[in-house]
Image: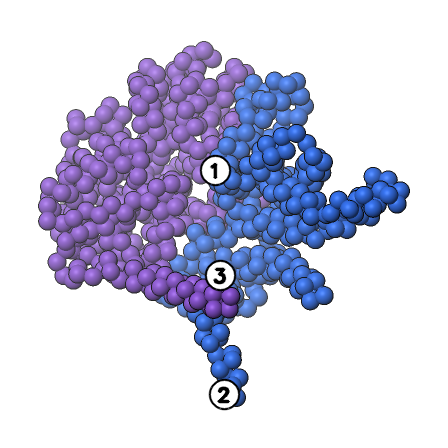
Amino acid sequence: MRVNRKSAGAVASAAVLGLTLAACGGGDSDEAGSEGGADQVEVFTWWAAGSEKAGLDALVGVFEEQHPDIEFVNGAVAGGAGSAAKDLLQTRLQAQDPPDTFQAHAGAELQDYIDAAQIEDVSGLYDEFGLTDAFPPDLVERLSTEDGAIYSIPSNIHRANVLWANPTVLEDAGLDTSAEYEDLDAFIADLETLDGEGVTPLSVATTWTQVHLLETVLLADLGPEAYQGLWDGSTDWESDEVTGALEDFETIMSFTNADRDGLDWPEATQQVIDGEAAFNIMGDWAVAAFEEQDKELGTDFVAVPSPGTDGVFDFLADSFTKPVGAPDPAGTDAWLETVGSLEGQVAFNKAKGSIPARTDADPAEFSEYQQTAIESFANDTIASSLAHGAATPVATLNAISDATSKFTTGASDLDAYQSELAAAAQG
Amino acid sequence: MRKKLRRVGPPLLLLAPSLLLLGVFVYGLIAANFQMSFTDNHTAAQATGQAPAAAVWFDNYTALLATDAFQHSLLNLLLFTAVFLAGTMAMGFGWAWLLEKPVKGEGYFRSIYLFPMAVSFVASGVVWRWLLNSNQDEQASGLNRLFQIIGLDFLQNNWWNNVTFGIIAIAIPAIWQLSGYVMALFLAGFRGIPDELREAARMDGATELQLYRHVLFPQLSPVALSALIIIGHMSLKSFDLIMSISKPANYQTKVPAVDMYVFKSSFDYANAAAVGAILLVIVAAVIIPYLIHTHREEKR
């Protein structure tokens, strides 16, 4: 018996030791053999399903044509609208085991990686690939930090301030089916009318979509300049204008569905598709949800700038970075070249439903909705999206989300909400 | 000396790897966590050493405990634990008591009650998110719809979307999932009591009530204590169920574990570590007295 126990213990400790050694060794092996010349590139994204996956596949197709000698390694992590991927990415960067390039929202969301010295300045590549001229100057300015460095190359542009409407529901309530609104007051008046009709006037989902709604309300009431000022400190969060906007937000939230916190955006958009709700404010990725169900723009659904934001393009962009210490830097450059190239952007965005960041793409290649978005992107004032990381660093956005959830569940009043938002923006 | 070494040496050598691993990966990391929580490491730059971080000792703790948001999380945790504990203990004991007398198809019932434990919290959370839909009246679905169908409309409520008591709604699936386990524990306890004892008590003229009060309950108390500790510490750690029903940003269902997650994803490692440390202390406050108690029992 004694011998047995001893040998069992020995076997167990040997096993544990072996596992530990294996775990230690695992990290090094994939980095070996890639000094200098690139033979592969690991691309880390959360594009693992649906139109996002289709877009990535299209982009990879172009990449393989442009760089046939470099192997593409898909590092996509599914789940949680990117939150699972972001968590894993944070861990890998912290452990200094970065992928060759990773997807991140362009703009202020990159600030944390920049501060942590985890990504490299790629403005040299902008000159090399001729991107400075291909992207609109407004966008390049937004991507640059104060000292002129640029840390990512956008693959696509999304518009956040889109109002989706079901014209049948509007017609039944005796409202104008084109659903364009000059300002929020006209919009709120129509929400009131709809409220008596037994439908949800405006569908909304969980906290981030409520922040998304808040952002379009702030944009409508403050205008793009003062809205932008909220993020650089030139607009006072405690001002009466902001109070007015938050009052409008409170009113609009009172016309939304009760089960919002249990839903994510597709379910909220589905309510408009099914005619259970009249309106939904969501980014232009929602167009895929309508099109997948054979709905026609104009007859089955309407997409217009969200109330009071005509002439403003509230942008967010997916972009790719060059991490410090990437194992295959030449592969990273090759991938970034494809991402920035005209063919790459056209192929990717045709599949994903967003629009190219480049201004030289031919609009005729895209869908009807995309053509209107391309036109607005070229002509409108560009604003940075709060809910999607273009306007603020992650910590600020998290604090704003917390405050918003507290307010919309009824745990804080407008005054408290406003001061919490001000505190959040302070950082 | 040599003799002693020969006697203690080999076992120590055998134990050394696991002691070492335990020391590094459990106690070492706990120490690292405490160390992190004593710094002002609140940004991504500090986390990677690009910006300096200074020791602030207990500042993070006092600041955290002073915020309404964290007090709300702690209160939620308390409510959740209380309801979860009371619910599983009552249900588990009730079922065990019913099954304790030989019933027809006992094995069948036992499996049914125990079955929910085989489902992961994440999987059941997805289903319960739908069951606990907060829509009422015309738009109702899930449990609210069921209440309508059976004519108990007044029972409809907004479940976990209630600011103050929402967390209790999430305790319902937790109770559903673990009462079967508590039942199994109690059933084992009941079966462990020899029939002779009951017969002897009946012979002595004890009523059923007295039989339970003086003969059966005292023998079940170790089982009850284990069940309390197991359920109690599970409830303190519960994160997966809450996350799969609600979202991390939802104020109404925040608990410290969710705060820890949000801090971590905001690159605020010091506060995340502080929340972790607070949770560890709470769990320790539950577990350590139990360990001391069982240690004493074994010695006796």
Q: Which mark is residue B123?
A: 1
Q: Is residue B257 visible?
A: yes
Measured in 3D between alpha carbons, the distance from the residue under mark 3 to the one under mark 2, in whole angstroms, is: 48 Å
Q: Is residue B173 left or right of residue A270?
A: right
Q: Secondary structure at mark 2?
A: helix
Measured in 3D between alpha carbons, the distance from the residue under mark 2 to the one under mark 1, in whole angstroms, is: 58 Å
Count numbered badges in the picture.
3
Which color has been applied to chain A in this rendered view? purple
Q: Earlier in the sequence, mark 3 or mark 2?
A: 2
Q: Is residue A49 left or right of residue B67?
A: left
Residue A255 locus on image (x, y percent): 52, 26
| Subunit of label 1 | B
Identity, as a three-letter code, of the amino acid under mark 3: Ala
Q: Secondary structure at mark 1?
A: helix
Can you say whether A351 is above or below A30 in the image?
Answer: above
Which color has been applied to chain B in this rendered view? blue
| Subunit of label 2 | B
Q: Residue at x 30, y 40 (%)?
A: A47
Q: Quadrant of residue A344?
A: top left
